Image (spheres, rainbow, N blue to C red):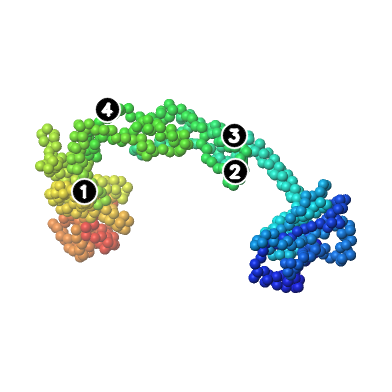
Amino acid sequence: MKNWGEGTERKKKREKRSKKEEGATIQGRKKYRGRKNNKDSENKDAGNRELVIVELEDWDEPEEEPAAWKWPGMSEPELEAARNRGKLEWEAVRNEPEKPGEEMKEDEVLWEELEEPGPGMEEKAAWNGLESPKPGLEREDVRHGPGWEGKAASVGEGEKKHSKGKYRKRIGKAAAWAAAAAALLLFVLFGLYMALAVYYEDGFSYGTWMNGVYCTGKTVEEVERELLQSCHYDGITVYDGQGGAYVISPEEIGYTFCFREELQKYLDRQDPYLWVKNLASAKSGKLLPAISFEKEKLSAALGRIPDYADPRTEKERRVEIRKTAAGYILADERKHVLDKEKAMEAVERALLSMETQVDLAEAGCYTDLPYSSEMKEVLERWELIEEFQDCHIVYRFGANEVPVDASVACDWIAVDEDGNFLTDGEGRLLPDDMKIEAFIEALADEYDTLGGVRPFHATRGETVMVKGGIYGNKIDRKAEKEYLKQAFRDRAAEVREPVYLQKGWAEGKNDIGDTYIEVDMTEQMMYYYKDGTLEVETPVVTGNTGRRMGTPEGVNYVYGKARNRVLQGPGYAAHVNFWMPVKGNIGIHDASWRSEYGGEIYKTGGSHGCINTPYDAMSRIYEMAEVGTPVVMFY
C-alpha cells in the first residue's frame, strides 16, 4: 500500500475545523460506521474478500455526509470493475449525537459491528501505515466477508492496537518457528546439562579443588592417591615449660592417616545436578585426613619430658629454701606443675591437625597448686633472704671481673649460736662484718701479684715460674673492707676498681702485659717486646755465679733512666752510656769494656749483678723502653 500523507489542502481544512471546534460546544459523540454495499452483500459465493484500509477523506462541516472510502490508485472505472468482482467498499459515516447535551469525545473514532458473520467466513485484517483522519487514530481494524460488517476499536492519543488479520498471521508463523527453535535449543541444553550431571554422579563436581589437587570428575580413590602423594608428616616437636624441645616421630607412635573417609563425606554433600553453581567460582577446600595413632605409645614418648615423667603427687610437692653454689634458692614444687591430662590432650589435638609443634605452656597445660599455712611461712622467710642476697657490686681487675652477688652475699648473713638468722628491729636480716672482711682478704690474696709466683711463657718455648721481684699490684685491704661493708648496706650497684698500695703496669693476675723486657739468664739472652712484638734480641752477660754475684731472678721493672753514669762499687768504677735500674743497684747498661757476650761467660767472668748489654742493642732499648716497663728475670 502507498502511504498517503496529508496534502496542503487537507492540512488547511484540518486547521480550519480545529479552530471551529475549539470555540464550539460539542454535542454527542463522533461515530463512524461501516456499512456494506447492498449489491455485494447478497453475493454469498464471494468467498474470502481481501480488503485494504484506505485513507478516509475529511470534511469541513459536521452536517456534511462523509465521503466513501477510496481505493488508492484506482480510477472510477477500475473501482467499478472491482465492485463487480466482489470487492467490498466500506464507508464511514458520521452519526449525530444520540442524546441532546451529550459531550463528544474529541479525536475518538468508534467502529461498530452491525451483524454477525455468515457461515464459512474467515476473519482477515489488513493494516495500513496511513495517517489517521483524526489525531491519535493510527490504525483501523476491519473485518470482511459476506455477512460481515467490520468494527474498529478506538485508538487514543499514542495508543496502538494490533489486528487479527494477515499481518498477524505472518507474525504468528514467525513466532511459532522462533518458539520451536527456542524449545529445541532448550532441549539440547537440558540434555547436555543432564549428561554432565550424570558424569558428576560418581566424581567430584565442576571446579572442585582439595588441598591444591584438582578433583573435578575424579573418583574418591583417584583423588586420595594424589593427596597421599603430596601429603607428608614428619612428626611433632613438643616444648615444655622450661624451653626443652622433644621430637616425636610418626613411627614412634604408630601414626597413620587416610583421606578416603573425609573425601567420601565431601562428595556426598555435593549435588551433581547443581554443578552449575560452581561456574561462577571454584569450590576450593582444605581437607584433613582421618588420623590414627596409639595413645599408649604417645604417652611413652611424652615420658621423655621431665615434667611429664615426674611421679610426685600433689601432696608430695613441697616448698623449701635451699642453699646452692649460686646462693639461697626457693624450691617451690607447687608452682608451674604440668597437668598430664591436659598435656596429652594438647598433643593429641596437634597430631590430629597435623601440626608440627606444640608448646605445652602456651596450651595452658601448667598450673599452680595451693599452699598450706606452713608453706606460706616459708615463702615469707624466703622474701627476707632474697632481699638480703640481692647484691650487684662487681670488682674489676684488668680483664678479670669478680661479681659480688647472691653466691657471695648468702654467706654474710649473721646467725646466732643455734644457726638461726639474726634480724634488726625492722625484721630485716643482719650482715656479719667479719665475713665481709674475710671476703676482701681472700680477694686480695688472689689478685695481689707483688712478690708472688707467676707463670711466664719464655721465648725459649717453655713456661717458667718466676718468683719474687719488686713489680706487681698490692690492694689496700683496709680501705676495701670499709668500702664493701658500707656499699652492701646501701644496696650499691656498681663496678669497683680497688684501691692499691702499689699498682703494676697492668691490673689483674696477668699484670706483665704485652710490653716487657725478658732476661733469660740460663740462655744469656735479652728480649724486648712492645705490644707483643719482638723489637730487640741480643746476647748479654749477667752476674758472676762463680763468685756468688749472680743476678737475682724475679719480676722487676724499670724505675729510672740515665745517660753517662759512673757505676761504683768495692774496688771498681765504670762509665756507662745508658743506665736503667730495675732492682736496687742492679740495672741494665752497656759495657764498653766487653767485646763478647752470651755463652757461659757469666759463670766465671760475669758482672757484679747487672745485665751487661752491647752498645747498639742497649741504645735501642733505652730509647723504646719506658719507666715502669716490667723486667722478667729468670734462669
In this rendered view, identify the residue nearer to me: 273 or 207.
273
In this rendered view, identify the residue nearer to me: 465 or 541.
465
Tag 3 near tag 2, CB within 8 Å: no
Mark 2 or mark 4, which is nearer to you?
2
- Residue at image mark 4: 315
Name the N-terminal-most of marks 2 and 4: 2
Q: Residue at x 77, y 51 (%)?
A: 115
Identified by mark 3, the residue type is Val
Q: Residue at x 83, y 55 (%)?
A: 50
- Residue at image mark 3: 220
Helix, strand or loop status at disc 3 = helix
Name the disc covering residue 408, or none.
none
Asked if residue 606 shows in the view, the reply is no
Q: Residue 593: horizontal and vertical position, in percent?
A: 23, 60
Identified by mark 1, the residue type is Ile
Could you tell me how far apart the alpha carbons at marks 3 and 2 are, in whole angstroms? Answer: 21 Å
Crowding around mark 3 (Cα neighbors within 10 Å: few <14, some 14 to 19, many 20+) is many
